[in-house]
Amino acid sequence: MAPLAKAGGLADVAGALVKYLHADGHDIRLFMPAYASIPYARLQYYPVEFLQNLSVQLGTTQYVFSVLTARLPGSEAFVYLIDCPACFHRPALYTSDADEHLRFLLLTHAAFICCQRMGFAPDIMHFNDWHTAMGPLLRQTMYAWDGLFQYTRTVLTVHNIGYQGVVSAEVLPSGPTALLHQEDLRAGRINLLRHGVMYADLITTVSPSYAREIRTPEYGLGLEGELRARADHLVGILNGVDYDDWDPRRDHFVPRHFGANQLGVKADLKDDFLKRLRLSAGQRTPLIGMVSRLAEQKGFDLLFTALPRLLEAHNFNLVVLGSGEPRYEAFFHGLALAHPTRVHFHRGYSDELAHWIEAASDMFLMPSRYEPCGLNQMYSLRYGTVPIVRRTGGLADSVQHFDPATGQGTGVVFNDYNVEAVIWAVSTALDLYQNRGAWRRLVQNGMACDFSWKRQVKLYLEQYQRLSL
Ligand code: ADP
Ligand code: GLC
């Protein structure tokens, strides 16, 4: 959960949901691991006296944890940090260690145990992704005896079905197996996300389009059967944007601010940024930005062929921020070496650079193979940075293809997942950029969009309330 720990969009979503639900008057308590990387020095946190040295038995291992609490920065909401150094003091938030599933099973149990000890009977327990997807089943089995949870309804949000938490059945702690997916068990494995989909009272995902897509084999990646069976309990709610953090009129990371009628400031920011990156630019040379986890999902395979051809055929600069799979890192590194005055690649993670890229770029490229929601295209719209996206998942739900004839639309959208399509899309955007009137219209259409969390949180509340009736 941002700003305490972040590996991707889930952190932004969790932080915003807690903040806006709390602001709306709800008693929301968030449980997350007390990762070693949390900036404790900047956080006022306290040990919770009656939540010390609690233990959970998972298989043959006994885990001991204590609980720290703090207010979510920028909010009054309480966050509970599950402090178990054996599990959470590792070099990264997510690992490929053999006990990865146990780390998060511990977190899931800890949430129940803390509620019990606090005498807190939640109306809704909201779990996210495979890591905590066993929560709904635990509620129905191990914790069913406790009247505290009698009226508790469970929600599972699928942020990304590409990660399902498939583990060998042997490594699961012992317990009743009748409710487990029998076919998986016979194959000797267990798919944690599948169990969330089977047992949550409500399944949500992070855009309406993705909610439809994951019911097909192409996008459901093996869970389409369960999702189709539970279609009446599956809804898509588009993520929102926290405009306190992502707004060019008050961005803390950039020195000058602008709204839809101050696009000259954006052009000045671009000049400063290009100097800083040591990229050279002629008059009206567009800058394309990318900020991303470098994972296959994001469509980088298309760029191996598309970007060299585009750089050959058109005049533009490119700035890429990201880290991840070595083949993509090597590709962008090589591209920057081949075009030192036109392409900049920053390998790593940087909030500051991410904000600069949004503020200074003219276009933002997201050619995703699949995208449950995607946040950067929505950030881009607010920053007057025209998104170039594939029509999939949340990208399809948040960006409309621009039609110069009518002046309607907010970005450039392509359909097919192939090299020609992405080349077409980027070329279309570069051509549009040369038409000053049309470009201004396109930019301003995007800046006028409102994807605020204030609105999206209401959709979650409607669902929570329906469950609690
Ligand atoms: P995903 O969760 O699949 O990575 P999203 O678009 O939902 O994709 O969210 C990604 C979030 O992580 C955005 O807030 C984006 O700015 C941020 N991000 C991704 N990579 C980096 C990076 N290298 N440096 C800074 N922020 C990053
Ligand atoms: C996932 C998805 C991304 C989504 C984010 C937050 O990581 O890949 O599309 O925006 O979760 O829901």
Image (cartoon, grey):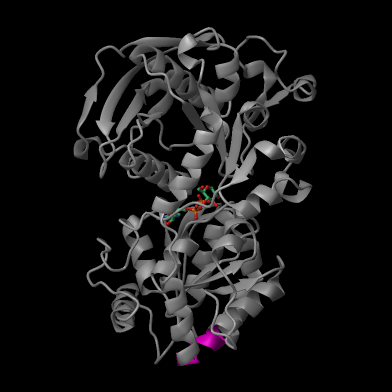
Q: Is residue 95 something that shows in the picture?
A: no
Quadrant in which the N terminus is drawn? top left
Residue 246 spot, x, y in % from top left: 35, 60
Give the number of marks.
Answer: 0
Q: Position of residue 398 (x, y in %)?
A: 54, 63
Report the side of 198 relative to 92 (left or right). Answer: right
Residue at 54% from the left image edge and 86% from the top image edge: 432
Q: Taken as a whole, is the magenta stretch helix, strand or loop?
A: helix
Judge by depth and name the residue closer to the eye, 278 or 164: 164
Q: Quadrant of residue 233?
A: top right
- Rendered image quadrant of residue 31: top left
Is residue 333 among what the camera can see? yes
Give the side of residue 467 with respect to residue 380, left or right: right
Looking at the image, which residue is at 33% across and 11% down?
53
Viewer-closest of 193 and 20: 20
Which residue does the image show at 33% across and 44% down from the upper left?
Answer: 3
Q: Residue at 76% across / 25% down in the picture?
A: 184
Residue 459 magenta-drawn? no
Per the image, is 434 magenta? yes
- Looking at this view, is 226 or 33 the one in front? 226
Magenta part of the protein: which range?
430-436
Residue lying furthest front: 469
Left or right of residue 113: residue 389: right
Residue 160 image offset from top left, x and y in percent: 59, 44
Residue 354: percent from the left, percent from the top?
38, 61
For residue 101, which quarter of the picture? top right
From the viewer's side, name the closer residue of 190 and 456: 456
